[in-house]
Amino acid sequence: MIDVPDSEILPLSLEHGFWTWSAQAKVSPIPVKSARGVYFWDVDGKRYLDLNSMVMCANIGHGDERVIAAIVEQAHELPFAGPPMATRPRAALGKLLANWRAVVENAVVSKAEREDKKRGQERLFE
């Protein structure tokens, strides 16, 4: 890994990085050094509560050993798969989401039918 001193993280990132959804001349990124759980620390040791969850990802916390182990395992088996490739994880996730969708759809229809009965309306779904 390339060694970058803490004091160089911010200037090098500003010089060579591109900041999505931002006016480039006005960005003020935090030079992050480490993270654990729901917190991250900057190069000066200041702790922040990571409230970035759901901006671009679902944050389950930093440094969770189960997630790290799963990433390592997947990297050993297949570190990258492009969009046109069918893989075991994609197949399993697709099946899981399809089953979940069916459960959600059934729950929504059941709820709608109960609400219709309360209002004395005929069934909207067949």
Image (cartoon, rainbow, N blue to C red):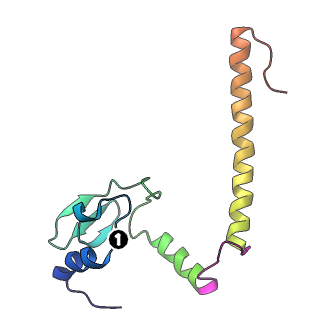
Please state the horizontal and vertical placement of residue 101, each as a whole percent of the image: 71, 46
Asked if the stretch drawn in magenta spans residue 82, the answer is: yes
Against 111, residue 65 (above or below) is: below
Residue 5 picture location, percent across and down: 20, 86
User: In the image, is 96 to the left or to the right of 14?
Assistant: right
Q: Quadrant of the C terminus?
A: top right
**Would residue 28 be visible to someone looking at this image?**
no
Q: Residue furthest bottom?
A: 2
User: Where the N terminus falls, by quadrant?
Assistant: bottom left
Which residue is at the front of the view, 67 or 12?
12
Query: Is residue 95 inside the magenta stretch?
Result: no
Q: Which residues are magenta?
A: 76-86
At label 1, the amino acid type is: Phe
Q: Which residue was labeled with disc 1?
A: 18
Residue at left offset 43%, top offset 68%: 64
- Magenta span: predominant SS is loop
Residue at 40% from the left image edge and 54% from the top image edge: 53
Badge 1: how crowded within 10 Å, few (<14), some, or many (20+)? Answer: few
Task: Label 1: state its secondary structure.
Answer: loop
Front-lying residue, 65 or 103? 103
Can residue 40 be spotted in the picture?
Answer: yes
Please tell me which residue lies in front, 63 or 90.
90
- Please state if 27 lies on the left or on the right of 77 as rendered: left
Compared to residue 16, the image places residue 106 above or below, namely: above
* Outermost residue to the top: 120
**Which residue is most to the right?**
126
Residue 73: name its quadrant. bottom right
117 above or below 65? above
Residue in the image at 64% along x and 78% along y? 81
Residue 21 horizontal side relative to residue 94, left or right:
left
Residue at image x 70%, y 24%?
Answer: 112
